[in-house]
């Protein structure tokens, strides 16, 4: 994409846009340093065999039962990296504008879940036509995650399709989450499928989605196109999104989840 379409670094317009849409992002969005402790930057995410990834994040995934082997660790990391795209998706759904994150760091909880993203540098594109915005959003999402995906595929040996399935799953969750916050969940999920479906590999990796309801509460559930391998960890637990479990078992797990307190 022509770099002239993008406006300058994280200040002014980009900072204001991210601040306005941060509540929709599904994780804490940090726009100014809150201390360097505990952050893992994008460059480190592309080196899973080196510190701090090997010492902290990958090791914690193993301890928490998400990383029984390299393939499982890579799948878990791609799910988390997909979740980190929340600010990009939120800005698009809320204001029809596209953010391209160029420099960032992530912070994980002790149980390895993604807690926050520190956006250090970002740019914003301006287009009038929805088709152009969709193309820009797709380019932004893939540019954000492609370096991490390539590194994890090389490190783990897990297929590109499998890792893209993890990304597509988390991106669709973020579309649903932001849409629910805006009271337009169905439209947001539909838009997510349109945007991601424009990419041949992502179209194959898109999860099946369906809604499970309990009274007034409902949730968008998924069936992934590849397994995250979490069941190989010490918990021996299958996800309700797993493509290898029986549908009747999946629905039981889905209903248990929907019935829980928020």
Image (cartoon, rainbow, N blue to C red):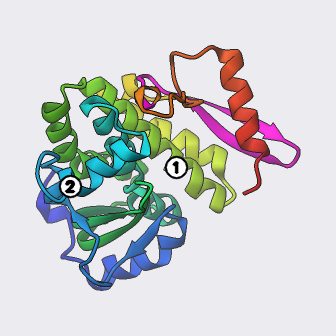
The one of 102 and 26 positioned closer to us in this rendering:
26
For disc 1, the marked residue is 175
Q: Nearer the viewer, mark 1 or mark 2?
A: 2
Tell me where residue 167 sits by quadrant.
top left
- The answer to whether 91 is drawn above or below residue 234 in the figure is below
Asked if the magenta segment contains residue 212, the reply would be: yes
Q: Which mark is residue 31?
A: none
Name the residue located 32 percent from the left edge and 76 percent from the top edge. Answer: 14
Q: Would residue 121 be seen by someone viewing this image from the given angle? A: yes
Q: Which residues are magenta?
A: 209-230
Mark carried by residue 55: 2
Element under label 2? helix
Q: In the displayed structure, does residue 262 sit left or right of residue 47?
A: right
From this view, report whether residue 152 is shown above or below residue 208. below
User: Which quarter of the figure has residue 214?
Assistant: top right
Q: Which residue lies most toward the right here? A: 215
Q: Is residue 134 visible?
A: no
Q: Is residue 222 left or right of residue 254?
A: left
Q: Where is residue 103 shown, x and y percent of the image?
A: 19, 66
Residue 188, x across and y down, in percent: 57, 48
Q: CA distance from mark 1 to mark 2?
A: 32 Å
Few, some or many C-alpha atoms within 10 Å of disc 2 (few <14, some 14-19, many ≥20)? few
Choose between 147 and 189: the one closer to the eye: 147
Q: Residues within 10 Å of mark 1 (few under 14, many from 20)?
A: many
């Amino acid at each position: 994409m022509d770099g002239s379409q993008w406006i300058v670094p994280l200040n002014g317009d980009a900072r204001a846009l991210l601040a306005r849409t941060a509540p929709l992002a599904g994780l804490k969005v940090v726009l100014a340093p809150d201390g360097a402790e505990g952050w893992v930057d994008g460059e480190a995410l592309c080196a899973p065999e080196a510190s701090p990834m090997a010492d902290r994040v990958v090791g914690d995934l193993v301890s928490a039962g998400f990383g029984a082997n390299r393939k499982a660790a890579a799948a878990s990391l791609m799910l988390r990296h997909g979740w980190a795209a929340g600010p990009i998706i939120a800005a698009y759904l809320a204001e029809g504008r596209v953010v391209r994150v160029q420099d960032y760091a992530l912070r994980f909880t002790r149980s390895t879940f993604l807690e926050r993203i520190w956006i250090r540098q970002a740019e914003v594109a301006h287009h009038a036509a929805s088709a152009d915005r969709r193309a820009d959003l797709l380019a932004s999402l893939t540019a954000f995650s492609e370096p991490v995906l390539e590194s994890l595929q090389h490190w783990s040996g897990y297929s590109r399709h499998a890792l893209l399935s993890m990304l597509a799953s988390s991106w669709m969750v973020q579309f649903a989450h932001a849409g629910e916050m805006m009271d337009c969940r169905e439209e947001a999920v539909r838009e997510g499928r349109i945007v991601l479906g424009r990419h041949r590999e992502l179209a194959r990796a898109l999860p099946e989605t369906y809604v499970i309801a309990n009274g007034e509460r409902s949730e968008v559930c998924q069936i992934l196109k590849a397994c995250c391998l979490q069941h190989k960890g010490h918990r021996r637990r299958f996800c309700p999104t797993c493509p290898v479990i029986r549908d009747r078992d999946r629905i039981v797990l889905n209903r248990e989840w929907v019935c829980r307190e928020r």
